[in-house]
Image (cartoon, rainbow, N blue to C red):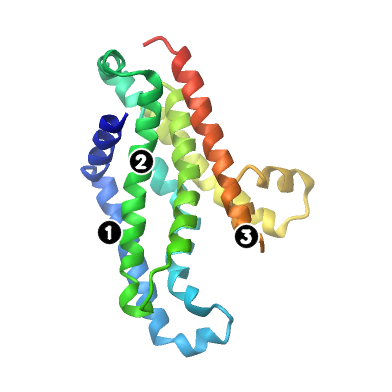
Amino acid sequence: MFAISLREFKSLFQSIRAIIIIVVLFGVTAGSAKLVSQFKSELSGLGLGDNAYVIGLMLLLFLAAPLFVTSISHSSVNKELESKTIRFLATKTSRESIIFGKFLGNVSFWVVCLTVALLLIIPFSKSFYFVDLIQSIIFVSYFIGLSLFLSTLVSNSSLTMFSGIVISIALPVMGMWSLLSKNVVVDALSYLTPYFYYTNENTSYTYLVLIHTAVFVILSLIIFKRRDL
């Protein structure tokens, strides 16, 4: 499992799209921190406190994380099916190890990216926001699990890329819409997105997103175990 995780982790850093995402992530984080440091007195009146330094990063994740994650993780499993390398992997390790390894490899990639992004804020904030890091990782893990599920469910990587883009646009829109709408259907659907839990006043709700992530991974494993390789 750990060998597959390491392989997935390395392959993500070798992707051109991943490099572009990293540059954007770091650029927005550092830029927003520098901007906040220049207007700290004005922002302090808004009651944002030191968390103002991570606003840029969190806003970027809220709006772009679905697209970022799905663009580089949409073919985690089905690319192995298309290249037939999955048969080789299945002879060397269990199917459970393949799914969990793929998931952990993707999570590890984002843990490194988000950790470095928050480290870039330290020269401005003079502190490291560990809680915000954990919540960012949990938020991103939702879309990693979703991408893994789509990649396991759909054999065609081009189709998962298209569906990933559609979902990455629809989920933020639905999440933001649910904050303003009184529609019962929209409110009910919002419980299926991480945005409901991250916009709740009770910050402990954010950890409930892990349930969604676990469901995606378990469903991926069930489908993969039934799939004929």
Circle 2: residue type:
Asn
Residue 193 in picture, x, y percent from top left: 60, 46
Circle 1: residue type:
Val
**Residue occupying the point 62% across, 60% down:** 199
Residue 221 in picture, x, y percent from top left: 47, 23
Quadrant of the rendering where the C terminus is positioned: top left
The residue labelled by disc 1 is 23
**Residue occupying the point 44% across, 40% down:** 144
Q: CA distance from mark 2 to mark 3?
A: 25 Å
Q: Is residue 75 visible?
A: no
Looking at this view, name the residue that lies furthest to the top: 228
Residue 16 is left or right of residue 221, and the answer is left
Residue 34 in picture, x, y percent from top left: 35, 79
Circle 3: residue type:
Thr
- Mark closer to the chain start, 2 or 3: 2
10 Å crowding of disc 2: few (<14), some (14-19), many (20+): many
Q: CA distance from mark 3 to mark 1?
A: 27 Å
- Mark closer to the chain start, 1 or 2: 1
Residues marked 3 and 1 touching at CB (< 8 Å): no
**Mark 1 or 2, closer to the camera:** 2
Determine the secondary structure under disc 1.
helix
Q: CA distance from mark 1 to mark 2?
A: 18 Å
The residue labelled by disc 3 is 199
Determine the secondary structure under disc 2.
helix
- Relative to 113, residue 123 above or below: below
Closest to the observer: 38 or 95? 95
10 Å crowding of disc 1: few (<14), some (14-19), many (20+): some
Closest to the observer: 95 or 80? 95
The residue labelled by disc 2 is 106
Residue 226 in picture, x, y percent from top left: 47, 12
Q: Is residue 194 visible?
A: yes
